[in-house]
């Protein structure tokens, strides 16, 4: 039950689809009778699954008694929502005016090149997904990118690999630690 | 009561009226596209923009309230140029194959371009990738023609509560359609065609089957018979410029003969038969419930409207036992034409072609349901909408307006006033009560002029109650029983009614549901555009037809008596069971 209340996606690699769907049921129950429930439910569902799989959308449609066409229409309207699996880490490159003029486009190009993916895609190892955004409110320190919930400022193309490595190293450290504690047990 | 001037004409309108409504009152026409009376006013297309003195920008008149002292200009340079730009932009992303489009000469965008004198489109550029959806027997969607006005979205979601379509995507790539580029056949679409009835352009239309009918008529080995639904006679005239509500029964029969049909029959005949079968079914269910204390499904729902049938299969599959097992009049006709009538004229069912003219697109779907082949072959071969029949008559060069009156053939052409009113919301209920009451009590239904007025008219959900008295010995168990009935039209009203029943808030014995607002007279295949005012005119015409008849109760129809004597035996009998009754299929919603 404790696990159910954790809304984030970072620590749930082992959760089975049934567990995730049960978590979604909880979210739907909470919002069911509230007006304007669709968007918050979609946001939380995406946090649970990492993206919005068809099975989740159908459950939301039935649970909130909203036509499936409307659910799909809302998902397709907002670029925040994705119906494809996303990587473990979401990279959003700001292309707002300030970031754009200070080299946001070059940062984006470099990321595309380094990760060998296009905007909206995920690396084959499902570690990174790449997207663009408009303004994080960090214009004074442009160009900015956001990885998961962290804003990186005054990003230079040459420094990108270093930033990416931080995430890869952290993941590795966490995996090592887990293996260690498992071995102890 | 604000007073304003529009193009220097002073007009006073009720509080809350829009500028568009004020202009109408002042006799000034403001062009519109997404706006549709009784359906939606959302200011999406911007075609109805006007200039208001003191306002920073042009305003969409369909959503701007008229204000005291406003000075509105509909024909200023700014308004004219703004409107033209909007229409040119719409045209720049529209597949403009007007000459071969289903809506040629019946298209609101084409009419706008004509009225605004647009001769060239100054915005060449990218066009949306078109998608043709021919997945259903009833409807064809062509997204290349869609102008994103959302009328279809409003009727599908709000009027019908089906929600098969919605705007998908954003900006230039927006498509109005089912989820994730699915086709209509993949989703909960009930094929009612209300979308096609309100579409201003050719983006969604019925599947045109006129050529199939010509091919049948041209085939010397086929005997081709035609049936026309009760609602056609009150609307077909509109295809030829006649006033809505003009009854054209006799001219319609003559036109069908001139088109070459071998026999011109009437769905009204099987509407009368439906009353015999469905009325008996209802009384049998009541007897089982009240006398035998059996667990029988009540209320019983009518089953004439194929959109409603598909709707309940999707949305309330646990209530299918409540639906009358009677086939719709169209399908009863098909099954009998290829058995009873075929035997009479010495033909095999496979040498017969049964054509229906229906106010409905879902009837095209219904005719193709696998269970509708009880004659051994598909019972109804081709279904035309009222609009398609209009086009066929036009193609044949028949001067419809000046045709002499004809009468239907025997033995499946005679009908009573009770069958006429099947076209109207509340009509099947009234027809059923006229017969059931008389069967049970031996006296005439105690309503003035046989009209059950509480269930007539355009209110979404209507109720009535009658208490049986002086019942015949066979039906004495009904003495003192109050039969409660309800009528809903438009599927969102059907849904409201069902939810009331499921929550225990209301209970009834018998419920009539018609898919389309107003009933069949407002069907998805009727001449465009159907407003509530036009619905009322057609409804009144149908009641007039009923009142003009000598016979106004289904059980008095001599051809009905004849078919029971010669062929069917008795209502709910063995032959009836095989040919006139059916079963339903639960379907998954999502």
Image (cartoon, coloured by chain):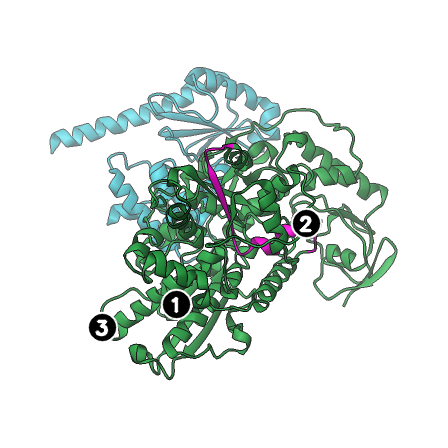
Chain containing mark 2: B
Query: Nearer the observer, disc 1 or disc 2?
Result: 2
Tell me, yes or no, whether the two marked residues, 3 and 1, touch with CB atoms within 8 Å.
Answer: no
Does the image show residue B577?
yes
Mark with earlier residue (1, 2): 2
Disc ID at residue B293: 3
- Give how far across and how far down residue B579 sits, in percent: 34, 51
| Figure check: A127 above or below B435 | above
In the figure, what tint was chain B given?
green
Query: How far separated are the C-alphas under marks 3 and 1?
Result: 18 Å
Estimate the spatial distance between the alpha carbons at disc 1 and disc 2, rounded to whole Å: 41 Å
Which range of residues does the magenta coloring cover?
B219-243
Compare residues B28 and B126 and report the one nearer the observer. B28
> Is A7 drawn above or below residue B507 in the view shown?
above
Q: Counting residues from the N terminus, which is met first, the one under dot 2 or under dot 3?
A: 3
Q: Quadrant of residue B19?
A: bottom right
Depth check: give the residue in front, B243 or A163.
B243
Please say whether residue B35 is visible from this viewpoint.
no
Chain coloured cyan in this rendering: A
Residue holding disc 2:
B403
Which of the image's four quarters has the C terminus of chain A? top left
Q: Residue furthest right?
A: B8
Q: Based on the picture, tell me whether residue B287 belongs to the magenta stretch.
A: no
Mark toward the viewer: 2 or 3: 2
When asked about the image quadrant of residue B385, the answer is: top right
Q: Which mark is residue B510?
A: 1
Q: Residue at x 50, y 59 (%)?
A: B414
How far apart are the alpha carbons under marks 2 and 3? 57 Å
């Amino acid at each position: 039950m404790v696990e159910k209340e954790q809304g984030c996606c970072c620590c749930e690699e082992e959760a089975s689809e049934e567990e995730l769907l049960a978590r979604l049921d909880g979210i739907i129950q909470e919002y069911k009778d509230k007006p304007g429930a669709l968007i918050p439910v979609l946001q939380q569902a995406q946090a649970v699954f990492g993206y919005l799989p068809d099975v989740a959308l159908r459950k939301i449609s039935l649970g909130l008694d909203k036509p499936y066409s409307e659910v799909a229409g809302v998902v397709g309207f907002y670029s925040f929502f994705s119906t494809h699996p996303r990587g473990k880490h979401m990279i959003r490159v700001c292309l707002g005016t300030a970031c754009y003029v200070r080299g946001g486009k070059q940062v984006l190009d470099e990321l595309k090149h380094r990760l060998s993916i296009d905007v909206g895609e995920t690396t084959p190892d499902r570690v990174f997904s790449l997207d663009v955004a408009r303004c994080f409110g960090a214009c004074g320190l442009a160009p900015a990118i956001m990885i998961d919930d962290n804003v990186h400022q005054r990003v230079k193309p040459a420094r990108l690999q270093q930033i990416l490595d931080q995430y890869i190293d952290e993941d590795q450290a966490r995996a090592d630690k887990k293996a260690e504690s498992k071995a102890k047990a | 009561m604000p007073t304003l001037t529009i193009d220097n004409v002073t007009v006073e309108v009720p509080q809350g009226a829009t500028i568009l409504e004020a202009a109408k009152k002042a006799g000034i026409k403001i062009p519109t596209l997404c706006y549709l009376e009784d359906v939606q006013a959302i200011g999406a297309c911007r075609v109805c923009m006007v200039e208001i003195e003191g306002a920073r920008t042009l305003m969409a008149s369909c959503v701007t309230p008229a204000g005291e002292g406003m000075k509105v200009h509909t024909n200023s340079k700014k308004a004219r140029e703004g409107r033209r730009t909007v229409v040119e932009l719409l045209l720049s992303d529209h597949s403009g194959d007007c000459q071969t489009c289903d809506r040629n000469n019946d298209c609101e965008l084409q009419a706008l371009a004509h009225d605004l004198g647009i001769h060239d489109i100054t915005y060449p550029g990218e066009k949306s990738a078109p998608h043709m959806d021919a997945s259903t027997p009833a409807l064809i969607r062509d997204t290349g023609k869609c102008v994103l006005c959302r009328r279809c979205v409003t009727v599908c979601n709000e009027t019908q509560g089906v929600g098969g379509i919605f705007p998908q995507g954003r900006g230039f790539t927006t498509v109005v359609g089912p989820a994730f580029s699915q086709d209509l056949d993949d989703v909960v679409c009930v094929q009612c065609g209300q979308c096609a009835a309100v579409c201003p352009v050719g983006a969604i239309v019925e599947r045109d089957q006129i050529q199939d009918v010509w091919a049948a008529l041209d085939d010397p080995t086929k005997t081709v018979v035609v049936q026309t639904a009760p609602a056609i006679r009150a609307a077909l005239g509109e295809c030829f410029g006649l006033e809505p509500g003009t009854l054209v029964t006799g001219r319609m029969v003559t036109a069908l003969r001139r088109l070459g049909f071998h026999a011109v029959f009437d769905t009204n005949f099987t509407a009368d038969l439906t009353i015999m079968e469905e009325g008996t079914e209802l009384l049998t269910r009541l007897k089982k419930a009240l006398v035998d204390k059996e667990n029988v499904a009540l209320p019983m729902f009518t089953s004439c409207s194929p959109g409603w049938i598909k709707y309940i299969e999707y949305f309330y599959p646990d209530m299918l036992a409540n639906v009358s097992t009677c086939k719709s009049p169209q399908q009863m006709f098909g099954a009998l034409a290829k058995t009873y009538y075929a035997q009479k004229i010495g033909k095999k069912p496979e040498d017969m072609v049964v054509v229906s003219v229906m106010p409905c697109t879902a009837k095209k779907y219904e005719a193709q349901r696998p269970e509708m082949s009880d004659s051994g072959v598909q019972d109804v071969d081709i279904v035309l909408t009222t609009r398609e029949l209009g086009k066929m008559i036009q193609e044949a060069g028949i001067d419809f307006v000046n045709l002499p009156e004809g009468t239907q053939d025997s033995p499946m052409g005679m009908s009573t006033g009770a069958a006429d009113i099947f076209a109207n919301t509340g009509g099947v209920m009234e027809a059923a009560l006229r017969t059931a009451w008389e069967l049970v009590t031996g006296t005439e239904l105690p309503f003035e002029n046989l009209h059950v007025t509480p269930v007539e008219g355009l209110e979404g959900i209507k109720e009535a109650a009658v208490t049986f008295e002086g019942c015949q010995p066979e039906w004495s168990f009904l003495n003192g029983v109050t039969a409660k009935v309800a009528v809903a039209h438009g599927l969102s009203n059907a849904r409201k009614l069902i939810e009331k029943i499921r929550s225990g808030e209301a209970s009834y014995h018998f419920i009539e549901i018609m898919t389309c607002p107003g009933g069949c007279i407002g069907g998805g295949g009727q001449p465009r555009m159907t407003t509530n005012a036009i619905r009322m005119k057609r409804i009144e015409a149908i009641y007039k037809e009923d009142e003009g008849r000598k016979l106004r109760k289904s059980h008095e129809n001599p051809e009905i008596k004849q078919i029971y004597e010669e062929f069917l035996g008795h209502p709910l009998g063995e032959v009836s069971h095989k040919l006139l009754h059916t079963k339903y299929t639960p379907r998954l919603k999502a």
